[in-house]
Image (cartoon, helix red, strand yellow):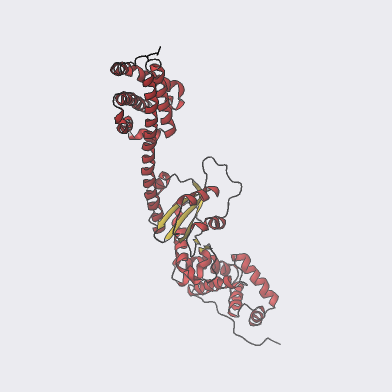
């Protein structure tokens, strides 16, 4: 004898029953949230009310969907329509999925044994809602990403142009800048296939934060030492020269120029001006390394009319030497004019070559540049020329003459 299947519960009766208990389901769901989700209990009353509205909307939408499963594509949007926009910013995707799970668990427990088809419908509907939640948060993240990119471009442009205003610190904070100290600007060319994520990953490994500006063929990185969340503080901070070397592969072909470090991000315009000036004249140095420091391009920048480079050469080379000892300036002039020959310089100054050698060593100790190298000799000679132009009493060389008998 063949067994006849048990008759299914009438769908209309099930729908009527679901509508009657929808209020109880919403109340039970809120109670479950309070018992199982600590983040929900810590919310302000207005936010908890908004979450309750979302749960209620989910139960109502399920009943509508159960009545007409063809409405699946629209239910997801209806489910989150009750959520105010600020709720999406305060509730994470993980918390949203926990909310969905709690609602499904309560509904599933209540309908258990009533009708197996309802239980299966709940599982199917919860899957669709989870996908809808992911779509909502993905679109919100995409919008935030576009906004952040525009804001980041605005901040970098403000730094490059030196048009920092009172709103710059708030814009920097809105970008989530983690910098806490010195900042330097790197300028180079934009590669054909530029990967922003690779730059940010490299920066995180170096314990620095970075602002990225793509201006046509020019790529600008504003780099600052950072306290990144979830990372221990490094015992030794990398020098910016090494940081620039690690970031160098992210640039396109051509020169990469590192501006001098400044105290804070709001002062980054000084580093940016030096880096941009160096980038404009880097081709004039045949042996320029990659990356090259902007201060190593001081002669080329000064010849191109960069007032900052002229001032830097005078302040860091000419004036310290002049204030320390006029003999150092005279010896350096003579040494450079005589093709960096110790003997010729000694003859001109009527001193022993060891005296010249000692004075050149003192020059290096005072200003940090060594006149015996060809590149540094060019920097020092440019500084002497600029310093002499800017002084009322030019440095005069002693006339050549015979040694006294």
At horizontal 46% and vertical 55% (from top left) the residue drawn is 221
Decide if residue 35 is in sight here.
yes
Give coordinates of residue 371: x percent, y percent. Answer: 61, 71
- Position of residue 349 in the picture relative to residue 142 (left or right): right
Seen from this angle, which residue lies furthest top?
1
Query: Quadrant location of the C terminus?
Result: bottom right
Q: Quadrant of residue 126?
A: top left
- Position of residue 390 in the picture relative to residue 67 (left or right): right
Give coordinates of residue 42: x percent, y percent. Answer: 43, 26
Compared to 225, does 77 lie above or below? above
Seen from this angle, which residue lies furthest right?
405
At horizontal 48% and vertical 66% (from top left) the residue drawn is 309
- Position of residue 99 in the picture relative to residue 358 (left or right): left
Give coordinates of residue 132: x percent, y percent. Answer: 36, 34
Decide if residue 225 is in sight here.
no
Q: Quadrant of residue 348?
A: bottom right
The residue nearer to you, when weighing 294 against 213, is 213
């Amino acid at each position: 004898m063949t067994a006849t299947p048990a008759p299914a519960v009438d769908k209309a009766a099930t729908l009527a029953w679901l509508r009657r208990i929808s209020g109880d389901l919403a109340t039970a769901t809120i109670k479950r949230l309070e018992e199982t989700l600590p983040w929900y209990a810590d919310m302000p009353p207005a936010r908890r009310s908004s979450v309750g509205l979302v749960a209620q909307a989910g139960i109502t939408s399920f009943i509508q969907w159960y009545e007409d499963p063809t409405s699946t594509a629209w239910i997801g949007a209806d489910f989150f329509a009750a959520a105010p926009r600020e709720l999406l910013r305060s509730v994470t995707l993980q918390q949203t999925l926990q909310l969905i799970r709690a609602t499904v668990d309560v509904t599933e427990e209540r309908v258990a044994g009533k009708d197996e088809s309802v239980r299966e419908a709940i599982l199917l509907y919860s899957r669709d809602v989870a996908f809808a939640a992911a779509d909502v948060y993905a679109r919100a993240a995409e919008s935030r990403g576009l906004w952040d990119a525009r804001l980041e471009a605005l901040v970098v442009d403000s730094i490059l142009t030196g048009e920092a205003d009172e709103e710059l610190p708030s814009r920097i904070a809105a970008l989530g800048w983690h910098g806490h100290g010195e900042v330097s600007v790197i300028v180079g060319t934009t590669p054909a296939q530029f990967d922003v994520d690779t730059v940010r990953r490299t920066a995180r490994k170096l314990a620095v934060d970075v602002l990225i500006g793509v201006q046509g063929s020019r790529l600008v990185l504003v780099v600052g030492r950072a306290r990144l969340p979830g990372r221990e503080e490094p015992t030794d901070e990398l020098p910016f020269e090494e940081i620039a070397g690690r970031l160098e592969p992210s640039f396109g072909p051509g020169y990469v120029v590192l501006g001098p470090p400044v105290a804070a991000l709001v002062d980054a315009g000084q580093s940016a001006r030096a880096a941009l000036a160096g980038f404009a004249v880097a081709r004039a140095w045949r042996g320029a390394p990659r990356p090259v420091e902007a201060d190593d391009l001081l002669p080329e920048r000064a010849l191109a009319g960069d007032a900052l480079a002229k001032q830097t050469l005078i302040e860091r080379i000419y004036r310290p030497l002049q204030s320390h000892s006029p003999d150092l300036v005279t010896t350096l002039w003579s040494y450079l004019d005589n093709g960096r020959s110790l003997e010729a310089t000694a003859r001109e100054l009527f001193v022993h070559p060891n005296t010249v050698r000692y004075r050149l060593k003192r020059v290096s100790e005072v200003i940090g540049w060594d006149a015996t190298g060809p590149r540094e000799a060019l920097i020092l000679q440019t500084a002497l020329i600029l310093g002499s132009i800017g002084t009322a009493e030019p440095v005069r060389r002693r006339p050549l003459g015979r040694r006294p008998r």
